[in-house]
Amino acid sequence: MRSKLLATAAVAATLVATLSACGQQTTGTTAGTGQDSDGDVPTIGLVMKSLGNPYFQDMQAGAEEYAEGNDEFVLKAVGIQSETDVTGQVEAVNNLVAQGVDAIVIAPADSRALVAPLKQAADQGIEIINIDVKLDDSALADADIEVPFVGPDNVEGARTVGEVLADELGAGGKVVILEGVQGAANAEQRKEGFEAAIDEGGLDLVASATANWETEQANTVFTNILSANPDIQGVMAANDSMALGVLAALESAGKKGEIKVVGFDNIPEIEPYLQDGSLLATLDQFGSQQAVFGIDAALALLNGDTVAEWEKTNIELITGP
């Protein structure tokens, strides 16, 4: 498997420098060796999206590993039932506020809908750090709140992955985009990046539809698109979970390997498809570390230090052998 590091932002080093210079929850875990929020160390709430998604499972594991044996903070990690469970995520934020956490690190399911509860949390003195999915700038401005973002350049990442497909197919290749949740900034940004690769490569975009980041939805959506457009040559999936749904649909249709697929996230489940060539490429955005960087940024704010408006995290192109 080959990889290409696309952004070498030394986020951990940046945050160290900053420190010195300045619905229904599906899980709830507490980690860390420090005292609780009534003691000497802060409690940090980590709010993720669907823990049915391997990407967020990896994020949770990375955060909990970082918290274990760490006496600087206590971690409370929660997730939601599905990628579209916005109500559940709002409830998770409200529950953490009620528990008296000192900071919230969040990967929002919706870039606008989570601004209001986060504003309420901030008004109670809770520090907020945004990871993974950028909160909507206009919604933040309307709420009169500034929230630092720690995360990747999704446009550049998707464009880079899309270029691999464009190079493989050549000008005129017929392609499909499977989008993430509508209203989520990273879904819009990845679509923008894919469209840039399509334009630059002279590809023909046959269809673009959401599958809400979900494998089963992607299987159904793509099966319908393929039935209506049997001459499709390539698919750009905005995350690997949807890429898995596409690959399953292709196998059912007897077209595995004939139609080329690219994804985004580099989850472990995608590795066999990279090895056999049915998945051309994916993009690693180091999910296990994003929450860690977010926690460090939250600690910086709690120390009274300054955190940059956007701490850009690394992305890496991953291709097959």
Image (spheres, helix red, strand yellow):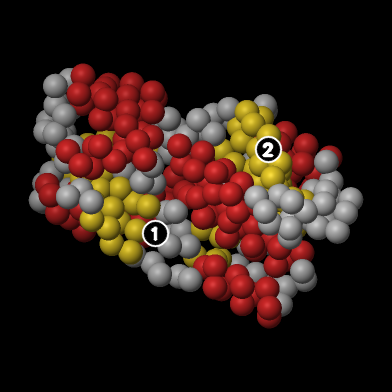
Query: Percent position (x, y) of residue 149?
Result: 58, 60
Q: Earlier in the sequence, mark 2 or mark 1?
A: 2
Q: Give the camera-side residue of 211 and 260.
A: 260
At 32% from the left and 32% from the top, the residue drawn is 244
Q: Which residue is mark 1?
A: 315
Looking at the image, is 180 positioned above or below residue 121?
A: above
Looking at the image, is 319 positioned above or below residue 83?
A: below
Separation of marks 2 and 1 at Cα, in angstroms = 28 Å
Question: In this orientation, does residue 20 appear?
Answer: yes
Question: In this orientation, does residue 161 appear?
Answer: no
At 74% from the left and 58% from the top, the residue drawn is 71
Q: What is the three-letter code of the residue carrying label 1?
A: Ile
Q: Is 115 on the left-hand or right-hand side of 228?
A: right
Query: Percent position (x, y) of residue 82?
Result: 54, 29
Query: Percent position (x, y) of residue 187?
Result: 44, 45
Query: Percent position (x, y) of residue 274?
Result: 23, 42
Instruction: Give the label on residue 29, or none.
Output: 2
Q: Give the camera-side residue of 275 and 249.
A: 275
Q: Is 156 on the left-hand or right-hand side of 68?
A: left
Direction right: furthest residue: 38
Q: What is the three-letter code of the residue carrying label 2?
A: Thr
Looking at the image, is 17 positioned above or below residue 217?
A: below
- Within 10 Å of disc 2 (Cα), the crowding (few <14, some 14-19, many 20+) is few
